[in-house]
Image (cartoon, helix red, strand yellow):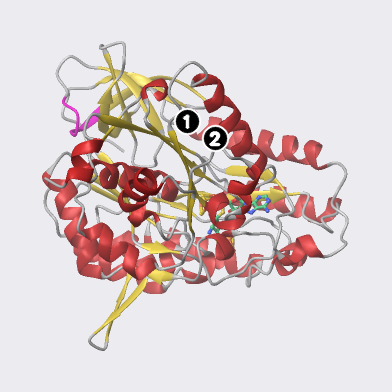
Amino acid sequence: MDQKIKNNLKKKIFIKTFGCQMNEYDSNRIYDLAFAAGLNKTEKKEEADCFVINTCHIREKATEKVYHEIGRIKKTFKELKKPLVIVAGCVAQAESDEMIKRESYIDIIVGPQSYHKIGDLILNHQRKKKKINETEFNVIKKFDELQKTPNLENKVSSYITIQEGCDKFCHFCVVPYTRGPEYSRPIQQIINEVKDLINKQTKEIILLGQNVNAYCYHENNKKYSLAYLIKELNKIEKLKRIRFTTSHPLDMSDELIDCFKTCEKLMPILHLPVQSGSDKILKLMNRKHDIKYYLSVIDKLKNKKENIKFSSDFIVGYPSEGEKEFINTLDLIKKVGFINSYSFIYSARPGTPVAKKEVEGTKNDKERLKKLQDILLKFQLADNRKYINKSCEVLVENKLKDGLKFFGRTKFMTPVKFESNNCKVGELVNIKVTSYNQNGLFGYHDNKNIKAA
Ligand code: SAH
Ligand code: SF4
Ligand code: F3S
């Protein structure tokens, strides 16, 4: 065995993850890479020899949050040996060596497109005791390298990144700058990784990308789309459920919409961020579509899959959003009846076009956010209420800590906690729902063999 790896044996790594599901996938892969370099994962931060903060830059105070986190690490390790501190993710990409200059407690900066080098970076740091900044964009190399290290994830529901980056340049968003241009992973590489996961515990695959439905891989003059990939995955017998996120309305092709009808494993819920219900604001945001178009996509999907449900992201208080435009957004929510959505107050991000303009935001954005969230909550509760006294199909993800109950999700992603004396993790079971709250459903395992929704 390599002497450097030997030296790492018994060392432990802890990762604190912020941001989107893609960051969760990345953190999981960083654990795999660290393991290959001789470092074991720990759940206890105070045990860490190597402490990674995987950061998100999407909204305000992102950078300050990282420095606060470092303050907390310093406190935790005050009486202990200082761990190797690595800042990864989108703040690392955006701030680069500024961070090392400002905070000497940081040892390594590594961007989202260079973390495949993390094993070497750790070893180099141990050897040379020099600060390292690695923020190159080399996404092809990243996935080629990652492929050589097995994905050790062993869960019922697993994420897999299939597409990265963004070419859309919405005027409020940092992603095109932190993750770089759109890139789609080779189709076979993805299928191999999915099969590996299925050979362990995985029964549900969630395909990830900042613009997952823009997935398009070219090889030997052939084009492979997300629809193609879903159709391939749908054939894998042991796989029970397929989902994908996050989609841009412009990239909802007819072929992809058709998959909701033809692929029975593709779950009937779609996260389709709209951001605003006003054409004027959508234009200012550079979203490249209007509400009429968005609703036409929703209609097409409903025509293919009658019971499909939708979730979305909303931004309130975007510069120039008046009362009228805000009401347009509330009207859209009432029209579509979204469940399980996210909403945020607009936050000016450094480097984005809208942040550079001297435009005034709305002053009552907190009030607007509350109003919007109240309506979203009403729809969420109404949706959860519909399950009462009915049976629904749940994929069992894990046993709860109390050792008696289980946790799983409906086809529509709604969380369910339930009692059962004979179900197994990884099974699809019928759950009779007895109560609900805004976060999910509660019930018991219904052994009668009835067809569940
Ligand atoms: N690619 C996805 C969204 C990725 S970012 C899409 O196009 O829909 C996730 C969400 O964060 C966005 O949908 C948006 O609602 C929110 N967001 C992004 N930038 C923001 C900003 N500057 N201020 C507030 N919310 C923001
Ligand atoms: Fe950001 Fe827009 Fe790209 Fe989504 S589509 S990641 S919101 S720039
Ligand atoms: Fe955040 Fe980067 Fe994801 S900015 S939302 S971690 S792509």
Q: Residues within 10 Å of mark 1 (few under 14, many from 20)?
A: many
Secondary structure at badge 2 equals helix
- 194 shown above or below 85: below
Q: Which residues are magenta?
A: 424-430
Q: Nearer the viewer, residue 306 or 368?
A: 368
In this figure, which residue is indicated by the disc labeled 1?
A: 384
Corner quadrant of residue 419: top left
331 falls in the magenta region: no
Looking at this view, is 19 or 125 the one in front?
125
Residue located beneath label 2 in the image: 380
Q: Residue at x 31, y 52 (%)?
A: 120
42 vs 413: above or below: above
Distance CA(mark 1)–CA(mark 2): 6 Å
Q: Is mark 1 within 8 Å of ligand 1?
A: no
Position of the C terminus, as image quadrant, is top left
Image quadrant where residue 369 sits:
top right
Q: Magenta span has 425?
A: yes
Please indicate whether residue 239 sits to the left or right of residue 31 in the image: left
Could you tell me the amino acid type at mark 1?
A: Asn
- Contact (Cβ within 8 Å) of mark 1 with mark 2: yes
Q: Residues within 10 Å of mark 2 (few under 14, many from 20)?
A: many
Q: Is residue 417 above or below residue 186?
A: above
Q: Name the residue located 42 percent from the left edge and 62 percent from the top edge.
A: 212
Is residue 86 something one can see in this rendering?
yes
Q: In the rendered image, which quarter is residue 193 located in?
A: bottom left
